[in-house]
Amino acid sequence: MKEKERLKTALQRLEKIVEELNRKDIDVEQGLEKFREGVELIKFCRSQLQKAENEFIQLKNELEQQYQEDESETDQQGE
Amino acid sequence: MNKEKNPLDDWNLFNQENDSTETSEISAVKKDYFTVTEFLDIVNIELSKISCRVLGEISDVNLRDRYCFFVLKESNPDAESAVVECFIGWRSFDAYRHLLQDGMQVIVSGFPGIYKKSGRFRIEVTKIEPFGEGALKQAFEALKKKLEEKGYFAPERKKPIPEVIQKIGLITSPAGAAIKDFMKNLGQYGFEVYHVAVFVEGDYAVDSIISAIKYFNRNMPEIDVLVLIRGGGSLESLKAFNDEDVANAIFDSKLPVITGIGHERDITIADLVADKSLSTPTAVASFIRTQREQIIQKLELVEEQLITLTGTIFDELKDSIELLIQDVFTGFSTIIQKYSFSIRHCAERMHGCLKRVFDSFKTIEKKFMNKLSEWHISIKDIENRISILEHQAIHSFGSEIENIKKRIEIAQAQLYSLNPEAILSKGYSIVYDKENRVIKNSKQVSKKDIIRIKLYKGKITSIVEDIQDS
């Protein structure tokens, strides 16, 4: 949950940076600064997303496996 | 000199009364006379040494409460008349009172003496025996009357003779016809006869008979009956059996006494006191024998009756046993029927009960199965919902991830498009001062300052040669 929260915050921060960079009055220095931060955030988001996705896939597999086991059990009892 | 006066000395003195004056003088000194009391004492002491038996006829009987005066007369009609006074004191009075009758011929035993108060000579009587047939008869009648008054002959006080006699205490002389007759007539029935030999006449007869009765009572209480027998004889010879002490001994005996004394006609005091009296020794034996024979007869009769009765009883028993057997069989089958009926009844009831139990069990089972399937359905439902939710979750999370991915990609694309250094590819470059600040105005630098120029590709470090303000 915490990580999800952080991911969400990071994503929001990233979108804000994009929004800020879109402003004309931003100078190169600040822009570079923000850009660097944005790159870091993207890296972070990607890695976090990858982590969450992996976990999600793993959990999903576990669920499916359990469901299959339950099915076979009820089949056996039915016999 | 003897200080104690010897009566014999005095007696001698008395005899020598008319002797010399010397003696008189001595007597005068000593005392030459008796007082009346002294005189009578001396005379009585001397007279008491003469134990006498005197035959005579009783007359002038003067009976008092506990003693008696009488006169004994010369009984020989041929002799001159003579009398002697007699006194019988309380010691002997009761035993001989019945003999104290005028005209009774007796032998009186006792001691002569002078009665001090009257000075009269008399015999102090210790014993009186009747003398002669007449006196004996008279004495017999007198004793009979006396004992009758005392209740000695009362039938209600007499001890019963046991029906079964086995042990006999025989009291008689070892010699003579009596014992022979008795033993001969007793018969061969196995009686146990214990004989105590006694004198049946003479001086020792009374004492020996009394001690024989006492002996059996004391030492052989198991004896069934005492038999006192004696052959016939004169009244004189039967004297012991008319004795009061013998009568008392029979009366006091705890063992029943049967007498058989004398001949047919003889009746003695002993016969009267005895618990059963028979005329002769033979009669006693016959009585005992007859009693035994009767018992044997009775036994035989009883035996026959017993056999007959036993037979009857057996027959009756047999009949009743047969009846009982029948009853038992009938009863048994009835019982079996009863039991089989009740068992069947029970079985039916049990069956009904079990059926109910099974039925209710089946109902419960059905209910349970219904509930189970309900649960199953609801579980399936929940499972479905879970799987829907799961799919939804997976879907939504997946789409969320996709969404985030997209957002990241968009942000990345935007970010990259907004890279301030992206403009360098179009030929622009960025100039930094030595503090790495972007130089946007020429006024920021001076001549000879080192600046660094960032190109699209690579960097250039140069020195400021000239500054032109715009």
Image (spheres, coloured by chain):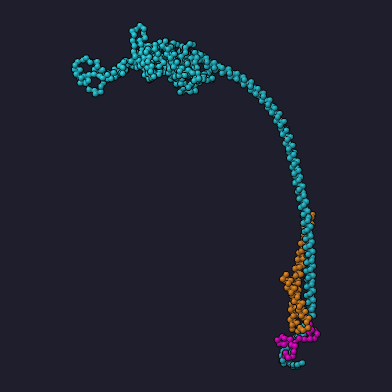
Chain colours: A orange, B cyan
Splitting the image into 4 quarters, where does residue B390 fall?
bottom right
- Identify which residue is drawn at 36% across, 8% down: B76
In terms of depth relative to the viewer, which is nearer, B449 or B97?
Answer: B97
Query: Could you tell whether B29 is left or right of B95 in the image?
Result: left
In terms of depth relative to the viewer, which is nearer, B128 or B404?
Answer: B128
- Identify which residue is drawn at 77% across, 86% down: B429
Query: Could you tell whether B427 is left or right of B236 in the image?
Result: right
Query: Could you tell whether B136 is left or right of B186 in the image?
Result: left
Q: Which region shows up in magenta?
A: B422-445
Judged from this view, the residue extending furthest toward the right is: B426
In terms of depth relative to the viewer, which is nearer, B350 or B12?
Answer: B12
Residue B339, visible in the rendered structure: yes
Relative to B205, is B332 above or below? below
Q: Is residue B30 magenta?
A: no
Residue B421, visible in the rendered structure: no
- Identify which residue is drawn at 66% across, 25% down: B317
Relative to A24, is B227 above or below? above
Q: Position of residue A59 (x, y in %)?
A: 75, 66
| Quarter occupied by the N terminus of chain B | top left
Q: Position of residue B378 (x, y in %)?
A: 78, 58
Relative to B391, is B319 above or below? above
Splitting the image into 4 quarters, where does residue B65 fall?
top left
| Quarter occupied by the C terminus of chain B | bottom right
Q: Position of residue B348 (x, y in %)?
A: 75, 41
Splitting the image into 4 quarters, where does residue B20 fall?
top left
| Total count of labels | 0
Judged from this view, the residue extending furthest toward the top is: B78
In terms of depth relative to the viewer, which is nearer, B89 or B258?
Answer: B89
Query: Could you tell whether B409 is left or right of B248 in the image?
Result: right
Q: Position of residue B312 (x, y in %)?
A: 65, 22
